[in-house]
Image (cartoon, rainbow, N blue to C red):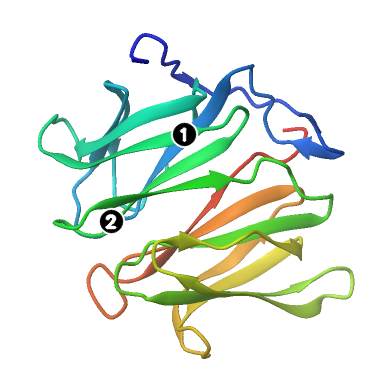
Amino acid sequence: MKRCGLLLVLILLVAAACSGTALAQEVQPDLAMLRVMHGAPGAPPIDVIVDGVRAFADAAYGSVTPYLAVVAGSHSIQVVQAGTTLPVLFQTTVDLKVNSYNTLSAAGQPGSFTVLPTVDGNCLPPLRIAAVRLVNLSPNAAALDAVLRGNVGVSRAAVEVPISGVASGSASSYTNTVVGTYDIDLRQPGTNRVLTSLPDVPLVAATTYTVYGIGLVDGRPGLQAVLTSDAPPFGR
């Protein structure tokens, strides 16, 4: 049991080396980073209980919590409605590696609740480059494409960066792109049909990002894109 050993503290952001690339956060030995994304349409605010400790409280739909530091290793996870202990909406076990960043994404709908664990990028991309991935949490979008559209670089050249065919309940790999301001479209796979869009998004150098597709295609709440940074820019 890890109830007494669970360490829950807000992260202090530091830089270190990572195989020649800046590490986003120097994690103390035996620690990992964990946060929660609530992407389950129709579900109330949630609490996440880690090894019997209420580690994340009152996470609202569409929100992403700050990272917390926890002891690396295997942890029991329970998701409940905010302020309650029962019923347990979903229960699982996750294994968190030392020095890893991790997100638990609440997905599905009431009656078919689930949690998608993902490992977040913590080795920052090179200078003048940002890295972006797509996580599809929409329960009725069998797959989604993301397309980043912008005029970037010294020449202000038009750029389109595709992330294609991300199935519901899964995450793409990270895709590198030149820094700049982009419109980020979520599209019906293999078509130009834009389902939702984030306009004028500045992507900062040496930063990793996740675009979460949440909500329902042609339903309520509607499909929307939520952008988060997975690690702070080097030196911040």
* Residue 128 visible in rendering: yes
Number of numbered callouts drawn: 2
Between 114 and 62, the one lying in front of the other is 114
From the image, which quarter does the N terminus lie in? top left
Q: Which residue is mark 1?
A: 95
Q: Which residue is mark 2?
A: 40
Image quadrant where residue 133 sits = bottom right
Farthest-out residue, top: 4
Between 193 and 119, the one lying in front of the other is 119
User: Which amino acid type corresponds to the residue marked 1 in the rendered image?
Assistant: Asp
* Left or right: residue 81 compared with residue 201: left
Tag shown at residue 198: none
From the image, which quarter does the C terminus lie in? top right
In x, y percent, where is residue 75?
A: 39, 28
How far apart are the alpha carbons under marks 2 and 1? 23 Å
In x, y percent, where is residue 230?
A: 59, 45
* Left or right: residue 205 compared with residue 68: right
The structure residue drawn at horizontal position 66% and vertical position 40%, both measured from the top left corner, is 122
